[in-house]
């Protein structure tokens, strides 16, 4: 089967590419602007979003949702997607070794594993839970924002992670469908 890209998917990729370009050009300015508007309640909220957006939370949430929907066959492709994407991300993290924006956080900044996990789930969720796909996309973008807001990533980190996650998720989903 040929891989066709729908208009909505092209828009999502385009938005992420624009964010990546903006990040490359203005990472520090965007980061500093978000740091200036921090409030205790927003930090609390963003910490919750970030906790839900970590890859193992996403792995658990999506796997349980697929199991409840009796789509166990899709759990395998979801796991393949998330672990392949995260493998790529961790190779890049240790290749680039980009320091996090604020000191005191462990690990490397580029690219974001949270963004990768959130966006690698989107292709399987888009095809399985069509009514909720836009809610998940909104959540995934909120995860990106939370990571910058909390001072652990730059915009280019989260945009690149999101692109990796989405691309790997789409490739895995397409490959499974092609061989079905």
Image (tube, helix red, strand yellow):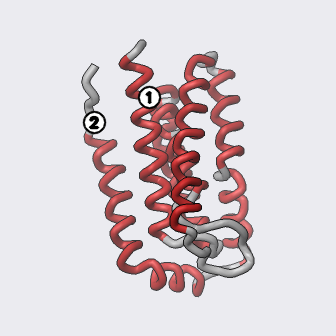
User: Could you say which disc has been placed on residue 5 in the image?
Assistant: 2
| Quadrant, the N terminus | top left
Q: Nearer the viewer, residue 172 or 75?
A: 172
The residue lying furthest to the front in this view is 95
Q: Is residue 13 above or below residue 132?
A: below
Compared across the picture, whether 32 is left or right of 47 comes to: left
Q: Is residue 170 above or below residue 87?
A: above
Residue drawn at the location 58% of the way across and 68% of the way down? 109
The image quarter in which residue 80 lies:
top right
Residue 167: where, in percent of width, then height?
Answer: 40, 43
- The 10 Å Cα crowd at callout 1, few under 14, some 14 to 19, many 20 or more, is some
- Check residue 163 in the rendering and tell me which mark sits there, or answer none: none
Residue 135 visible in this rendered orientation of the protein: no
Determine the secondary structure under disc 2. loop
- N-terminal of the pair, mark 1 or mark 2, is 2
Query: Residue 23: x percent and y percent?
Result: 41, 72
How far apart are labels 1 and 2 at the CA level? 12 Å
Is residue 179 something one can see in this rendering?
yes
Quarter placement of the C terminus: top left
Q: Which mark is residue 173?
A: 1
- The kind of secondary structure element at disc 1 is helix
Q: Residue 130 in the image: state x and y as whole percent.
A: 46, 30
């Amino acid at each position: 089967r040929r891989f066709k890209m729908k208009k909505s998917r092209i828009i999502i990729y385009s938005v992420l590419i624009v964010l990546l370009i903006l990040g490359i050009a203005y990472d520090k300015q965007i980061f500093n602007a978000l740091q200036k508007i921090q409030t205790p309640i927003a930090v609390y909220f963003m910490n919750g979003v970030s906790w839900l957006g970590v890859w193992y939370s996403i792995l658990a949430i999506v796997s349980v949702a697929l199991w409840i929907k009796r789509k166990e066959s899709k759990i395998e492709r979801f796991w393949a997607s998330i672990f392949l994407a995260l493998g790529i991300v961790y190779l890049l993290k240790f290749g680039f070794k980009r320091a996090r924006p604020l000191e005191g956080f462990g690990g490397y900044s580029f690219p974001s594993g949270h963004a990768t996990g959130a966006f690698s789930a989107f292709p399987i969720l888009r095809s399985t839970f069509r009514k909720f796909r836009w809610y998940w996309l909104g959540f995934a973008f909120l995860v990106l924002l939370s990571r910058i807001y909390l001072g652990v990533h730059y915009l280019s980190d989260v945009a690149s992670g999101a692109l990796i996650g989405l691309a790997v998720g789409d490739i895995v989903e397409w490959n499974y469908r092609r061989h079905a």
